[in-house]
């Protein structure tokens, strides 16, 4: 597949493309420390967290929480409690919005439907409002609000329905193959893989061949997308 020639909507993941994924990692570490304390164990080894995290990033598949629960809590069954505890701590502090986000949104505003399509907790809306992103968002595809999570197709189809366009008229911008690129492509959306956050440091040629476009960040993405906007409103 290639990027749509009749582009009408652009959806963005949040962790990685919009905010630093270090926010999520910090929340997971706090949750791990809590659960280990309840086990009578000391704080988690930060280097061990990085090792597990990097392995999941490299293979672009599998649950990070399951891997962390197995290796650092000693019980894969603690994935659920780890998830719930992480939710308490997962925030996006001021200063963690990537600087290339607002320029992209300003360029797209009024030319396409802009949506957030992400596995996030409800307070992310407050963070996006604080950081000046919210005025550009037309579709709020936040998993905690919608009730569906990636990679299941329901969150994507919910966003497409709200955007009023077909899958072949939309692009999804995310930083994971397993929860962003693959499910979006399976539905017929164009895909942009942002190589930061939970993307691997050194993607393989096979991984790079999966998205329609792989980019190091959002700089210059508007110049790629706008010529494809329906009605010839590209730059």
Image: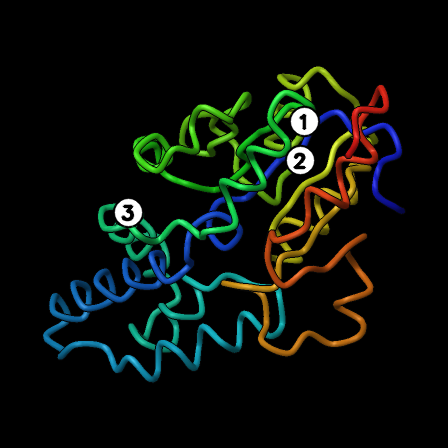
Residue at left offset 35%, top offset 83%:
48
Element under disc 3: loop
What count of labels does the image hold?
3
In the image, is residue 225 above or below residue 161? below
In the image, is residue 113 above or below residue 33? above
In the depicted view, which residue is nearer to us: 101 or 17?
101
Q: Which of marks 3 and 1 is nearer the N terminus?
A: 3
Q: Find residue 106 and report its horizontal and vertical position in percent.
A: 56, 33
Q: Find residue 209 and report its horizontal and vertical position in percent.
A: 82, 64
Question: Do labels 2 and 1 touch, CB within 8 Å?
Answer: yes
Q: Mark 2 points at which residue?
A: 153
157 sits to left or right of 140: right
Residue at left offset 76%, top offset 35%:
226
Farthest front residue in view: 235
Q: Mark 1 points at which residue?
A: 157
Q: Quadrant of the C terminus?
A: top right
Give residue 91's mark. 3
Compute the Cα span from label 3 to label 1.
26 Å
Question: Do labels 3 and 1 touch, CB within 8 Å?
Answer: no
Residue at left offset 60%, top offset 74%:
58
Compute the Cα span from label 2 to label 3.
26 Å
């Amino acid at each position: 597949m290639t990027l749509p020639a009749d582009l009408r909507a652009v959806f963005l993941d949040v962790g990685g493309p919009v905010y630093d994924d270090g926010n999520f990692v910090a929340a997971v570490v706090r949750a791990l420390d809590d659960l280990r304390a309840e086990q009578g164990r000391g704080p988690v080894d930060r280097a061990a967290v990085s090792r597990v995290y990097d392995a999941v990033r490299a293979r672009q598949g599998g649950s990070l929480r399951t891997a962390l629960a197995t290796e650092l809590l000693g019980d894969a069954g603690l994935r659920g409690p780890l998830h719930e505890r992480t939710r308490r701590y997962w925030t996006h502090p001021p200063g963690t919005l990537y600087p290339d986000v607002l320029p992209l949104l300003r360029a797209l505003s009024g030319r396409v439907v802009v949506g957030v399509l992400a596995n996030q907790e409800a307070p992310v809306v407050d963070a996006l409002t604080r950081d000046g992103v919210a005025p550009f968002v037309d579709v709020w595809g936040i998993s905690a609000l919608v009730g569906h999570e990636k990679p299941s197709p329901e969150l994507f189809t919910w966003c497409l329905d709200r955007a009023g366009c077909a899958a072949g008229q939309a692009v999804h911008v995310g930083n994971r193959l397993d929860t962003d690129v693959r499910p979006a492509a399976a539905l017929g959306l164009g895909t942009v893989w942002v190589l930061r956050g939970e993307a691997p440091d050194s993607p393989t040629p096979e991984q790079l061949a999966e998205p329609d476009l792989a980019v190091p960040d959002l700089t210059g993405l508007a110049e790629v997308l706008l010529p494809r906007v329906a009605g010839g409103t590209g730059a």
